[in-house]
Image (spheres, helix red, strand yellow):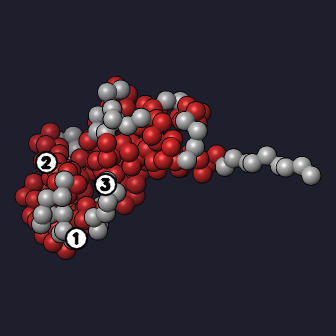
Amino acid sequence: MSVEPRRRDAAATRQALLTAARRRFAADGYTATSVRDIATEAGVNVALISRYFESKEGLFRACLRGTVDELKRSVFEDMPLADAPRLIAERLAGQPSKEPNQLLLLLRSSGEANADRIRLDVLNSLARRLATAAGSSPDDESVMLNAQVVLSTALGIVILRSAGLQPLTAAGPEELADPLRKVIEAMLGSARG
C-alpha cells in the first residue's frame, strides 16, 4: 500500500503566514518580531517565508499592502465627506478585541527603506483621499495639512485604544462618530464651501 505525499496548499500557507505576520508586526513591531515566531504561529516551516516573500522585509511589505487594500475597501474608497465620521468611527470602534488593530501596522517602522517608503506612501494616499472627499484638491498644501491632522486623530484613536485608555477603548461607533464629525468638519468642512 503506497502513501501519497501530502499536498501543499500554497495559497493557504501564504495566507497563514500573512495572518500571523500581521498580528505579530502590529502587536510587537517589526524589530521584535522574528520570522521563526511568525512561522511557528502559522504552523509552517520558516523556510517558506523566503519562498513566498523573499525575506522578513518582503513579508512586512505584503502585510502593509494587505492592510492598505483592506482600508481602501472598508473606509476610504469613494467616501463622501458627509459619511467620513461614521465610516471612520465604525472602522476604528469595531468591538475592541484582544487582537491588535491592523492600522497599527501603518505606524510601525521597519528600518528597511523600501517598506518605510510604502508606509509613508500609504499614509499620504489616505490623507489625499480625505482631502478629495472634502471636495478639495489634495495638491493644496493647507488642505493636505488639515487632512493629515484628521488622519492623525484617527490613528491616535487606534494607539490609545490599543493601550486600553478608558473610556475611549469601550466607546462604540455611535460614541466616536460625533467627536470625529466635529474634528472632520473643523479641519475639512470649510474646504467644501
Q: How far is the residue under mark 1 from the one under mark 2?
A: 20 Å
Residue 99 x/y as whole percent: 34, 57
Q: Nearer the viewer, residue 176 or 165?
A: 165
Element carrying mark 1: helix
User: Which residue is found at the position 39% from the left and 49% from the top?
Assistant: 23
Q: Nearer the viewer, residue 68 or 7?
A: 7
Element carrying mark 2: helix
Q: How far is the residue under mark 1 from the one under mark 3?
A: 15 Å
Badge nearest the viewer, 3 or 2: 3
Badge nearest the viewer, 1 or 2: 1
Outermost residue to the front:
1
According to the picture, the residue beneath numbered tag 3 turns out to be 101
Residue 44's image quarter? top right
Q: Residues within 10 Å of mark 1 (few under 14, many from 20)?
A: many
Disc with the residue nearer the chain's start (3 vs 2): 3
Q: How far is the residue under mark 3 from the one under mark 2?
A: 20 Å
According to the picture, the residue beneath numbered tag 2 turns out to be 149
Q: Is residue 57 left or right of residue 16?
A: left
According to the picture, the residue beneath numbered tag 1 turns out to be 173
Q: Amino acid at mark 2?
A: Val
